Image: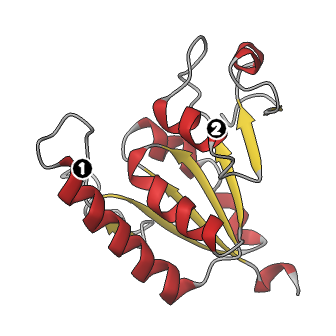
Amino acid sequence: MKKKDKKVCLISSSGGHFEELLTLAPLSEYYKTFIVTEKTKYNKKDTRIDYFTLQVNRKQLSFIPRFICIFFKSLLVYIKERPDVIISTGVLAAIPMMMIGHFFKKKIIFIESFAKITSPTQTGAFVYKKKIADRFYVQWESMKEFYPDALFLGGVF
């Protein structure tokens, strides 16, 4: 398979996680890429985004139904796009796509948030503990305390 034949899904929640994800956009020079993130009033017209999911927060009363909707939207996107690799900078809205990719034995790469220096994200801890990611990166060496098998190569910025 030639490099351009590989398809990469770049997925994250909105905000800072999405900004981190955009630092990986140059991968599109080497691979077919598509971007998935939560739809917000700030990004709904962003032409770089190929697919939107619902925005979700663990503390919302509607968390479970919204998360189920995100799962089915992710499944539809996965079936349509058939990515070879899924790269995520987190958090919650990205879990279903990573789990689907893991189930279908695709390569999963998780990059823990640049903002996390002394404690893990809940999503990072879940992905690490459940061994969903084939590669797990931290952006601060201090995070190796929480993720001893993670790879530290510095920040994406």
Judged from this view, the residue extending furthest toward the right is: 1
In percent of width and height, residue 31 lies at: 74, 74
Look at 21% across and 48% down and name the residue there.
Answer: 63
Q: Is residue 135 visible?
A: yes
Q: Amino acid at mark 2?
A: Lys
Residue 23 vs residue 72, the one in the foreground: 72
In percent of width and height, residue 102 lies at: 64, 65
How busy is the neighbourhood of tag 1: few (under 14 within 10 Å), some, or many (20 plus)?
A: few
Task: Identify the residue position indicated by label 1 in the image.
Answer: 42
Q: Amino acid at mark 1?
A: Tyr
Q: Is residue 153 left or right of residue 53?
A: right
In the rendered view of the protein, which quadrant contains the C terminus? top right
How busy is the neighbourhood of tag 2: few (under 14 within 10 Å), some, or many (20 plus)?
A: few
Q: Secondary structure at mark 2?
A: helix
Q: What separation in Å lies between label 2 and label 1 (alpha carbons)?
A: 33 Å
- Does the CB distance between marks 2 and 1 fall below 8 Å? no
Task: Identify the residue position indicated by label 2 in the image.
Answer: 129
- The quadrant in which residue 87 appears is bottom right
Nearer the camera: disc 2 or disc 1: 2
Q: Secondary structure at mark 1?
A: loop
